Amino acid sequence: VNLFLAVAASPTASPTPVSPFGPTIIHFNFLLSTLIWAPIVVGLLLATLPNPRGRFDRTIVQIAFWTNAGLAFLTLVAYNQANLFSSAPQYEENLPWMPALGVNYHLGVDGVTIPLLFLGSIVGVVAVLASTGIRERVREYFVLLLLVEGTVNGVLCARDMFLLVTFWGAGVLPVALLLAGWGGPLRRLAAGRYLAYGAVGTAALAAVALILYGTTGGISFDFDFLVHANLDTRLQVLIGLLLLVVAATRLPLVPLHGWARDVFGEATPGVAVLVAGITARLGGYLLIRLLVAAQHDGATVLAPILAFLSAATVLYAAVMMLRTRDLRRFGAYGALIPGGVFGLGIAGLTALGLLGAVLQLIAGGLAAALIVGATATISERAQTRDMALMGGLASRMPKLAWLLVLAGLAMVGVPGFASFIGEAFSLFGAFATQPGAVFVIGAGLALALAGIAITFQRVLFGPVRADAPGASDASLQEMWYLGLMVGVLLWWGIFPSGPKLGGSVTIFDEGVVNVINNSSADIMSSYPPAPGQ
Amino acid sequence: VRQALLVLPEALVALAALACLFGRRLHLLRSEWLPAGAAVLVLAALAAELAVGGQIASLLGGGFGQDRFALFAKAALLLTALLVVVATEWEGSGVSLGLTLIALLGGLVVASAGDLVGIWAGLQLATVASLALLGLRDPAAARRLLPVAGGLGALVAIGMAMVAGDAGSGQLATLRTGLTQPLALPLAMALLLVVGALLAQLAEGPWLGPLAAGAAGIALLKFAGTLAALGSAWAVLLPALAAAAMLVAALGAIAGGPARGILGWAGLLQLGWVIAGVAGGSRLALGASLFLFGAYLAASAAGPLALGDTPHGLAGLAERGVARAAGFTVCLLSLAGVPPLAGFFGEFAVASQLVRGGFFWLVALGFFSSAVVAFAVLRDLRLAYLASAGEVVGPSQTGWLVAGGAASAVVLVAYTFLANPISGLAVQGAAALGLR
């Protein structure tokens, strides 16, 4: 525990803030709108760009990259300038849109959202880098990629249910088209499944919005109004159940995980990274924002169910990782684990659990993206996804072998990676209220680690098969996109409270834990303390 | 003078129609000027409507009423007609263009009619013009449709006469208070069903469907909105009608069909939502319906125009013309109610009012149907963007198709972003029908 505390440092922000580098340097009032609309507008402009015989394919890739790089810079500014001592919405924009129906263009972010925005922008850059190998219909691919990124930012920034549903639903079709158009032989099946689950999730979310709107007098869709409504417990449970459906279709959680294997197994590395890294995380974000923060009685009633689903998800993923002989599916099952651990953190309904859950949402997203990206890239480079044909890859593709090992370790939460802190906080935070689920998930993680060890032994260090197809190591772009994710996971894992000069003066990064902490603590302040706390 | 200006849009449209029909025959105008001239006049009519249509007035002994409903409906029709005029490649004689404008005029008459006679006359004008137009392109289809449309028109006339007889007057204002006998409600419903059938029939027409459908839809909304507060018969039949439209649309969409069939099925789904909004029975519900109907009109008019002829199907459409594909996509997504376009906004707004009214089952059915149609939309968009044409097919887009695609995309996106003033006007329009 002492070692853990030394690594994780204090999650409480310093009462005497020292401004890090960045605040007040850049300030403008439509930062969030820029994050949402810039990729969409650039995407639509690219869609109208004449591109005879793919002459401008390379330019299109560059435009997509620099757009994402610009967004990453802006989110870095937002992250860096975040007010650590307020749980109120920041960078807020609020304009009437359809006032007769109570719809506002209301955007805002808090400590929970800002790191997720940053995560989204990193994943965006990574997705472009991972997609540089796309050769067919390049323009369409990157247009769809940019549209997805815009809608993801829209979901994260929305503070109006109407806007939230709009962006949530708008993100489904581009992802489905990305799946349908590029990827493995089962890509159409994957697209169909993703669309089906996406439609179910969108319908359930729309139902939540309409129930909240209808039961609060049909006055407004604004979060600030809806989340403060005093609903009776039965209605809260109903809303909570619908939200569980929405979240389970995205994170995903058992039993609504049916799309994940095919999507992560068939999509291009870029799309797989994008889905695993950020779009899937939106389900968890929704649980925090609409269930835990708003429906306190409903969350309390449903917490054991969520814990059960989370435990089932981790256990299922671990068992399937042991059983599968397909490397991409191995990565796909592995990508389910962070969602399960996140669910446990939420189900704990403690401040530490929620802090861990948010950290897990971010770090787990990166870890999931890393494992599906690494397995996809290795499968491409090894020209097979059948583990029986792999063996001795460490000698044939040493760089990718290292990255795969790091991805596996990050996924199960080995100390040094940000996912370790997320998992540890989630498990510790949930232990008081959901001990059974904690034990099951602990066992699941151990099983997953065993699966990783066995698979890596088989794939990386076993003997080279005589009939194995030729293999080559990672290209520069592949190194960059996988390395970037490893770097961020290590940075937040080693400096969760930010690097400090002389042990006290924060430089560059206030620390992801500190950015989250105030908002997560504020959300949990409405709940009674857990036994023993 | 200011009140007289209220009929300026109708006058401009009539002038344009006459010029197109007779200008060339009388050697007054050159044929190549007609589309541009008509577009300018329709644009001027739209500007005039937006400039002076805000006032509330009654002319011609109550036969012509200008209120916010009329303003919204006429603006939506004129915008739709502008899209049609700009994005269609007209033949030289100007007759087709003239008939199109006559149909528009019929719609305008319906929108500002103060009594049942005006509604019926406008509806017939739009129907006859549409039939004549259809006859120019497809005489066999027109012959088939003629007895159907004639019969439906007669039924509408009989129904309206019975309703007027029961209420003691054909004035819409009188219907709200005078229509009290239970007999009147089934009759009114029969009338509504007939108008709905007419709407659906004409919406499926291969040529100029949207303007005729616009006239019929406005008649439906106006009549139903006027009588919405009357009683329980509406609360059963209107939701049933909406549910039937939604289910049929879902089944039709998933069954597949010709390239532009998906536009029709998605449009029928949206009409189901429009009728569902009327079933909501409140000012906000009908306002949401009006807003959605405006989006429907624009998308259903522009979609087929942007698509053009598709002898090779949808496969590889994007390769053959980006503007075409973009226009088709935007219209299709809006009709299917896929976020974030105007159709979704309207459907969600209708759903929110249905929830307030307790129609949870209808909302659930609507979402289900929308999800099914979304599947079909994905199937067709995958074809358009991701499938190869299969054979070497040259770019088949003309300047008109490019204009149509671009204009439709711009109009629908603008409709989405200008949702604030548009939805506000729609709600005021519903209030003008006497709804609270």
Image (spheres, rainbow, N blue to C red):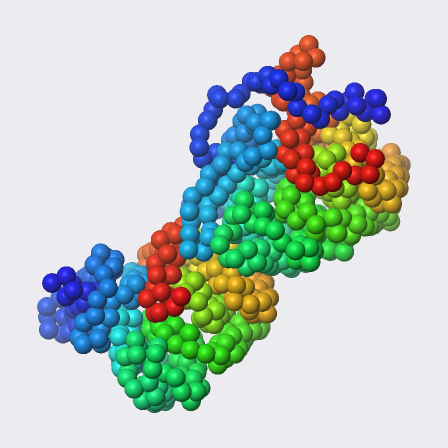
Which residue, as the protein is rendered here, is positioned at the far top? A502
Place residue B375 in its image quadrant: bottom right
How many numbered marks does the figure carry? 0
In front of the other: B340 or B257: B340
Residue at 76% x, 30% y is A421
Place residue A13 in its image quadrant: top right
Lateral position of residue A462 relative to residue A168, left or right: right
User: Is residue A304 something one can see in this rendering?
Assistant: yes
Q: Quadrant of the C terminus of chain A?
A: top right
In front of the other: A285 or A53: A285
Q: Quadrant of the N terminus of chain A?
A: top right
Residue at 40% x, 66% y is B436
Lateral position of residue A45 relative to residue A374, left or right: left
Residue B92 placed where, x, y %?
23, 69
Lateral position of residue A320 relative to residue A44, left or right: right
Residue at 27% x, 65% y is B67
Place residue B423 in its image quadrant: bottom left
Residue B319 placed where, x, y %?
47, 54
User: Is residue A56 something one can see in this rendering?
Assistant: no
Lateral position of residue A217 relative to residue B87, left or right: right
Residue A460 placed where, x, y %?
84, 35
Residue A468 placed where, x, y %?
82, 42
On screen, A169 above or below B370? Answer: above
Residue at 19% x, 65% y is B6
On screen, B347 above or below A524? Answer: below
On screen, B26 above or below A420? Answer: below
